[in-house]
Image (tube, grey):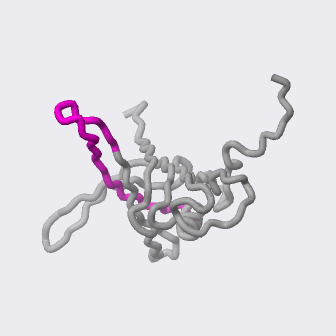
Amino acid sequence: MAGSVNKVILVGNLGRDPEVRQSQAGAKIVNFSVATSDSWKDKNTGERREKTEWHRVVIFSEGLANIAEQYLRKGSKVYIEGSLQTREYEKDGIKRYSTEVVLQGFNSTMTMLDTKGGGGGDFASSGNGGQPDYVSSDNGGGGAPSAPPPGGDLDDEIPF
């Protein structure tokens, strides 16, 4: 069907450390789960309510897999852009299905949202004044970050 879109955007926290494995061809594959939460005030009781959804994320892109393996830890806050894929497998003779957010090829992005010393773990020192450490997307150029961290140094003298 022309004009269809398969795009998922998530902002959430890792539920556990990423799991890294190798494909038969030697490519790195990274799996982790991201929790997203929605909160609201119950109209009847006035209580604060919260609902958490868990999303399976699989990274097939070598560059993003390297960054995830090296820097993501349980609790890390991430921004993920990928596509939904459902795979079928058999366990104990029963067909099962798993829907995952897949980061692969040109349509995937992962941005680490933690500041240094926050949430996720030990990040490399980048001297960026507490801004997120990496903004990375898979544009076929390997594992190098594709854009500078947002917010950068803006020490311009603005006269207003």
Residue at image point 67% right, 44% down = 150
Identified at 26% across, 43% down, the residue is 49
The answer to whether 52 appears left or right of 136 in the picture is left
Q: Quadrant of the N terminus?
A: top left
Is 72 a magenta residue?
A: no
Residue appearing at x 41%, y 41% in the figure: 6
Residue 88 vs 4, above or below: the answer is below
35 lies left or right of 116: left
Instruction: Compare residues 63 and 11 and report the one nearer the observer.
Output: 11
Determine the image quadrant of residue 127: bottom right
Q: Nearer the viewer, residue 153 or 20?
A: 153
Q: Which residues are magenta?
A: 38-62
Residue 139 is situated, as x and y percent measured from the top left of the image, at 62, 51
Magenta part mainly helix, strand or loop?
strand
Return the residue found at the far left: 93
Measuring from the top left, give residue 145's x and y in whole percent.
67, 55
Q: Position of residue 58 (x, y in %)?
A: 42, 61
The answer to whether 66 is drawn above or below residue 82 in the figure is below
Q: Is residue 33 left or right of residue 116?
A: left
